[in-house]
Image (cartoon, rainbow, N blue to C red):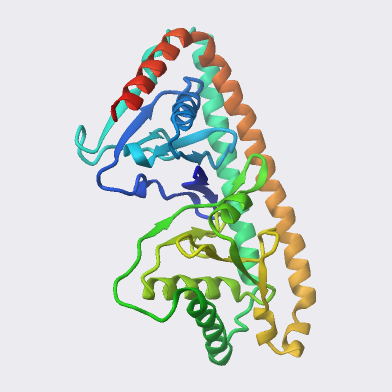
Amino acid sequence: MNETYFLGANSKDGFSSLYSGFPANPEDFLHIIKGGPGTGKSGFMRKIGKAAEARGYDVQYVLCSGDPDSLDGVYIPALHSAWVDGTAPHVTEPAAFGADADYVNLGKFFRGPFSGEEQAEIARLNRSYKALYSRAYGYLAAAAGICRASLPDLFGPEEQAALVKRVEGLLDRSLGRAKPGGGRVSRRFLSAVSCQGEYRLDGEIQKLCKLIYQFDNGCGGAAYALEQAARGAAERGADAILCPNPLDPERLEAVLLPQSGMAFVDDSWELEDARHVRLDALIPNERQQALRTELRESAKLSGRVMALAYEKLREAKKLHDELEAFYKPHMDFPALTRFTDSEIKKLLNQKN
């Protein structure tokens, strides 16, 4: 089964990275790709992934959080081989060069030099590009602050106990009681704050899990419920995929238990046939009523601030495209294609 996800996020704290856990298995080997904009890093990885798919292998694709149309990584579990874009903002280096990782230098296909005029324009574009991201992160921090401020602590000890009991009951039905031995835990983002706006991989949840419980979050209980689901799954020895919220990575927005085909998500997802768990019903209606106007206004305000962040990310993408336009005419793409084909041949022949 092919999978698609993110390992980076544009968040309230800047760029949030999960790349340190990629790939996950000790026997895997990581190829770290270096090269400037427009040097073909994403295309190189996509060709490798498609060639492996054509040979019948499952492939995992890691999308770029800034531009989901681009790849930042690819992983072929059966071949214990992974590739990652090792340039900023997710700079990657080997833990033990040659033993667990090596470098793939696509910059060697660049045929320079740039003219003095080109050098000056590239420097200007780089400064402007980084400044736009800095502004976007400022808006994201403001939006996250509004979201946190608008959700008061309505779940006291009594409500929390009822919430835990409800989550435990759902886990018991599929996983049984707690047992010794913890399961394997991995982390990935399944949504992104990107140049395309809010980008969600709803289909990945439905692909891995057929039984989906969706927690109401009108009163702010979903994050706590998801933490309890993750804890309860670990106590039962279940493998789990924990999915942080990209805007606020300290909070989860989904917990996937692929072995049992079960998932828990918050109400930000649009998933058909999800079973809704009414956490808001744990809070007396009169306590909710006093907050509804504030919650509506906060949601509108947060939405306006997020729109500004998306605008800056779109502007940054436009500048990045302009940067790539300087590099592409200087690339020896026929040589890159020959190199890519040779790397694919070595990869797919290693099992023969």
Identify the image quadrant of residue 34: top left
Q: Is 140 on the left or on the right of 294, as rendered?
A: left
Any part of residue 216 in sight: no
Vertical position of residue 230 compared to residue 70: above or below: below
**Front-most of 263 and 131?**
263
Identify the image quadrant of residue 292: bottom right
Vertical position of residue 117 compared to residue 234: above or below: above
Q: Residue at x 60, y 24 (%)?
A: 321
**What count of labels does the image hold?**
0
What percent of the width, then of the height, locates residue 91?
38, 38
- In the rendered image, the quadrant that contains the C terminus is top left
Q: Residue at x 43, y 56 (%)?
A: 187
**Front-most of 12 and 173?**
173
**Front-most of 87 and 106?**
106
What percent of the width, then of the height, locates residue 25?
30, 48
Vertical position of residue 214 compared to residue 40: above or below: below
What percent of the width, then of the height, locates residue 191?
58, 51
Q: Residue at x 35, y 49 (%)?
A: 21
Q: Residue at x 21, y 34 (%)?
A: 97
What percent of the width, then of the height, locates residue 290?
77, 84
Extreme residue toward the bottom, this view: 158
Q: Is 75 on the left or on the right of 267, as rendered?
A: left
**Front-most of 260 and 312?**
260
Any part of residue 12 in sight: yes
